[in-house]
Image (cartoon, rainbow, N blue to C red):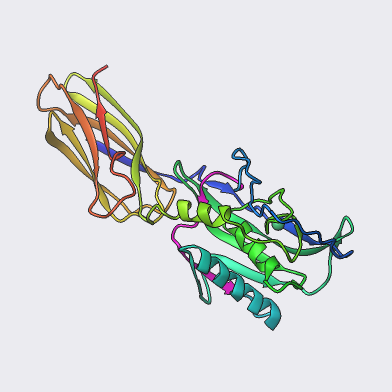
Amino acid sequence: MELKEGLLVAGNVLVAAILILYFINPGGELEFTSKEVNNNFTLGNNSVKMQFYDNLRFPSNSISYRIDNDCSLKKKADMIRAFEIIENKTTLEFYSINEGEEITVTCENTNRMEDGLFIAGEGGPTNITEGDRFKVILHGDILLIKDSECENPNVAIHELLHVLGFDHSENKNNIMYPITKCKQVIGDEIPARIEELYSVPSYPDLKFEKAVAEINGRILNLNLSIRNDGLQKSEKAKILIYTDDKVLKEIELKELEIGHGVSVQLTNLWLTKIKIEKLKVVIESNFQEISLDNNEILLSRG
Ligand SMILES: [Zn+2]
């Protein structure tokens, strides 16, 4: 009997960076009022994608950040207020740490222009791991350049929403419009989408990606690959191989980071009987997973 294990990691990192520029119009703003203002991101069009990719989220609703010491007191205060505003509208929580943060906030004091517009800031996810269920944001960056002159810290809120995976909106009244105006608001759709995304608990999710069996007489060869498609690192678990409901073999499964997988090759397993009706492979974990439906695979004789 031979057991080979290999780590499947490649192909997980979806992007290195999505940093999107945000502008301030130096010519001031033309305000006009209308009784019924549509503030929403999509302007009511259901086919408009709100995020850079579908189902982008951080591993948990508790997200760490660090604001660089070079940021002015005004920019620091704006950023902290932006975190509070999003916290008040959603279940997300932001906390400050000194290193290993998920969101890094840096600042720049020199004015930069592009196409006649001042650049207000830049932001977005910078490390995303691709899973089947979620594209998990492991890190995001915010760069605050020009101070927001609005009552609300609109530049900081806009960049924070980019880091949370939201793209630009075509609605001039929404805060995700590419050019900032003080009247822009978050609207209802963004908090609703955040609530929906973070309603899935922050658990690991071990699943089979592949299971191929080959039987020659009384010899069984198995080729398995298992991945953590969840939102947290998985603890040690077991793989059990059953033949007709009897355990034929038990294999230890090591801890797996989000998006990481392992491939297991078992060769020359000796079958106790020649006629096997059912071959079943099961992932057994003693921790909570997002789904247990993907922990079992039934292989039929083909
Ligand atoms: Zn932007």
Ligand 1, image quadrant it occupies: bottom right
The residue shown at (88%, 55%) is: 115
Q: Is residue 57 above or below residue 3?
A: below
Q: Which residues are magenta?
A: 51-66
| Residue 187 on image: x %, y % | 61, 57
Residue 72, visible in the rendered structure: no
- Along the line of sight, the residue nearer the viewer: 219 or 56: 56
- Along the line of sight, the residue nearer the viewer: 275 or 104: 104
- Along the line of sight, the residue nearer the viewer: 182 or 229: 182
The residue shown at (47%, 47%) is: 134
Q: Is residue 7 left or right of residue 157?
A: left
| Residue 218 on image: x %, y % | 16, 22
* Residue furthest bottom as drawn: 73
Q: Is residue 235 above or below residue 268?
A: below
| Residue 222 on image: x %, y % | 28, 31
Q: Is residue 116 left or right of residue 251?
A: right
Q: Is residue 175 above or below residue 1?
A: below
Residue 245's image quarter?
Answer: top left
Residue 301's image quarter?
Answer: top left
Q: Is residue 267 left or right of residue 133?
A: left
The residue shown at (54%, 44%) is: 54
